[in-house]
Amino acid sequence: TQLLEQSPQFLSIQEGENLTVYCNSSSVFSSLQWYRQEPGEGPVLLVTVVTGGEVKKLKRLTFQFGDARKDSSLHITAAQPGDTGLYLCAGAPGTASKLTFGTGTRLQVTL
Amino acid sequence: DAGVIQSPRHEVTEMGQEVTLRCKPISGHNSLFWYRQTMMRGLELLIYFNNNVPIDDSGMPEDRFSAKMPNASFSTLKIQPSEPRDSAVYFCASSYIDSKQYFGPGTRLTVT
């Protein structure tokens, strides 16, 4: 079983602060996805990274795929209350159909 | 498009009862996934279908769980008999081939 460990598990910060969430595994993935989930809703895909070392930016969010394609990070600059939610990474071993989800990072951004 | 539709949104039932969760995928999508989310185990894939055919059901916890997809626009996940440890949020997601998965709002199941 491929496991994806996320850290930290919980993060409570104030508006304007920066943060980084990590997603680590001992297994290699062909691609890795990041999702955000808000209370009472399903996860929503933010980004997919495919190439080792790849960096993608989505406004204030920066995603990086490790060179060995075993880990990833999500960096948020100047966090806002709207960033509050559960962040999940998900790895695809081969076909993107069968995803293994990480343990999740619950982020709360306060004013 | 209305997105992935799940019903009911909430279900409370007593141990031993049969529970049926329903999902309508996004029109045109050919893959459908059932997930379960709990605080302890996170989000787990239970089963997925391609073109209405079950491809991988290795995540189904035990024989009490079964899933069907009689046509491209409907799927069910059935638990019979239900147990308190089945309490969780169950998500359905759909996608087109290997592209982005779209999740429904989930069904929160409580078994007492």
Image (spheres, grey):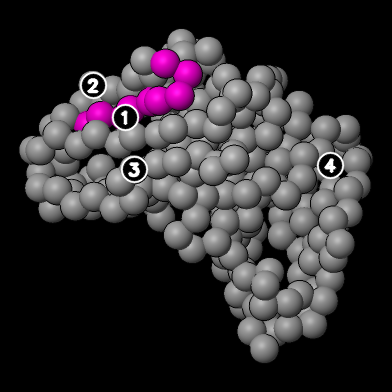
Marks 1 and 3 in Cβ contact (< 8 Å) = no
Task: Decide which of tag 2 and tag 3 comes sooner along the chain.
Answer: 3
Relative to residue A64, is residue B64 depicted above or below? above
Give me the chain letter of mark 4: A
Residue B27: give x, y in percent of width and height: 56, 28
Q: Residues within 10 Å of mark 2 (few under 14, many from 20)?
A: few
Residue type at the position of mark 4:
Gly
Per the model, the C-alpha gap separating discs 4 and 3 is 39 Å
Q: Quadrant of residue B70?
A: top left
User: Residue at coordinates 28% horizontally, 22% vertically from top-left?
Assistant: B66
Query: Share a chain, discs 4 and 3?
Result: no
Mark 4: give few (<14), some (14-19) or many (20+) Cα within 10 Å: some
Q: Which residue is mark 3?
A: B7
Chain designation of label 2: B
Numbered label attached to residue B77:
1
**Residue B73: in magenta span:** yes
Task: Give how far across and how far down residue A29 sits, in percent.
Answer: 72, 29
Return the disc, 1 or 2, that comes first in the chain's sequence.
2
- Chain of the residue under the numbered disc 3 shown in the image: B
Q: Which region shows up in magenta?
A: B71-79
Question: Residue type at mark 1?
Answer: Leu
**Residue placed most toward the observer, A61 or B75:** B75
Name which of mark 1 and mark 3 comes first in the sequence.
3
Q: Which residue is mark 2?
A: B63
Tell which tag, 2 or 3, sits nearer the viewer. Answer: 3
x and y, in percent, of residue B19 in the image: 20, 37
The residue depicted at 46 percent of the width and 37 percent of the height is B92
